Image (cartoon, helix red, strand yellow):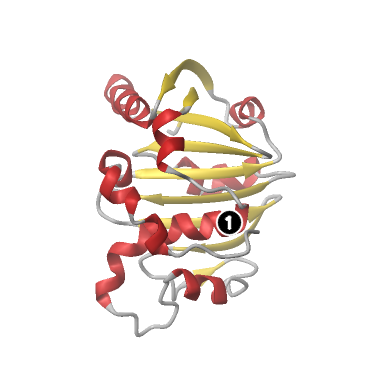
Amino acid sequence: MSGMTKTGADYAWFENDFPDIAEAYCFTLVRGLSPAELISRLEGRWEAPLQGIAEVVDAAFAQYDLEGGARQLIGMTTLGAWTLLIEPNGYLGVTEERALPASAGASWVSHFVNVNAVGTFLWAEDQVLRLCFDPMFPEDRWGTTPDELLDVMTRIGFHVDDDAPEAEINLSSPAALALAEHLTGVAVTPALLQDTTFSCATVRIR
C-alpha cells in the first residue's frame, strides 16, 4: 500500500485525456496470475499484440462487430506481481460467475463503467467476494467485508452516506481508479495506457 492514498481528483486526467476508453471500460488487476494463466482460466484465444490503448479500443470494437458481441477483446500487461486486463466496452472482470472462479489463489480488483454510466467495483480474494458496489452509489455495498475500506473510500472522494451530493457523480471512474490503486499498489498512468504494447486475447462472453 502506498503511503498517501490518491483521490479521485488525481485521476481526473483519465476521462479528459482518454475519452474513448473512459466512456466504457473494465480494468482488472490480478495478483498471482500471469497473462497466460489468466487467459487459460478464461478459456481465451490469443490475438496479435497491440501498441497503445487507442489500438486496443479500435480492435475491441472491430471484434465486437465481427462476432456480434460474442467475444471480448482483452489487452493485458504485467506490472510487478500484477496483471492488468483492459476490456474496452467490456465487463468480464466484474461478472461474478467468471471473475470469482478465475480468482482462485489470487487477488482480483476490477472496475467497470458502461456508456450509460452504470458501474461496478469488485474486489475478490481467492474466490471470495470481499466488496462490490456501483461507484455512483457507494452507500450500497455488499460482499464479506463491505465496510473494511470505508475510511479509504471517504478519503478518495466517495460519498458513502445516503445523503451524497449529486454533483459528485462524475468522479465515479476516477475514484474507482484510486481505490484500485489503494488495494493493489499499482498506478494506472497516461504513459502506461499510451506506450504499452499489450498482449491481446479474445474471450467468449456469451
In the picture, which quadrant includes the C terminus?
top left
- Write down the residue under mark 1: 123
- Amino acid type, mark 1: Trp
Label 1: element kind: strand
| Relative to 159, residue 63 above or below | above
**Residue at 34% from the left image edge and 49% from the top image edge:** 14
Q: Name which quarter of the figure residue 129 lies in.
A: bottom right
- Nearer to me, 89 or 206: 89
User: Could you say where residue 58 lies in the image, as x and y percent from the top left?
Assistant: 29, 26
User: Could you say where residue 157 lies in the image, as x and y percent from the top left?
Assistant: 42, 71
- Nearer to me, 98 or 175: 175
Q: Is residue 166 visible?
A: yes
**Residue at 52% from the left image edge and 30% from the top image edge:** 76
- Nearer to me, 136 or 83: 83
Q: Is residue 202 visible?
A: no
| Relative to 154, residue 103 above or below | above
In the picture, which quadrant includes the N terminus?
bottom right
Label 1 environment density (alpha carbons within 10 Å; few <14, some 14–19, many ≥20): many
Residue 62 vs residue 83: left or right? Answer: left
Point out the residue furthest to the right here.
Answer: 105
Point out the residue furthest to the top here.
Answer: 48
**Residue at 63% from the left image edge and 25% from the top image edge:** 36
User: Could you say where residue 23 lies in the image, as x and y percent from the top left?
Assistant: 28, 46
Residue 19 vs residue 162: left or right? Answer: left
Residue 79 vs residue 32: left or right? Answer: left
| Relative to 109, residue 37 above or below | above
User: Could you say where residue 188 lies in the image, as x and y percent from the top left?
Assistant: 48, 45
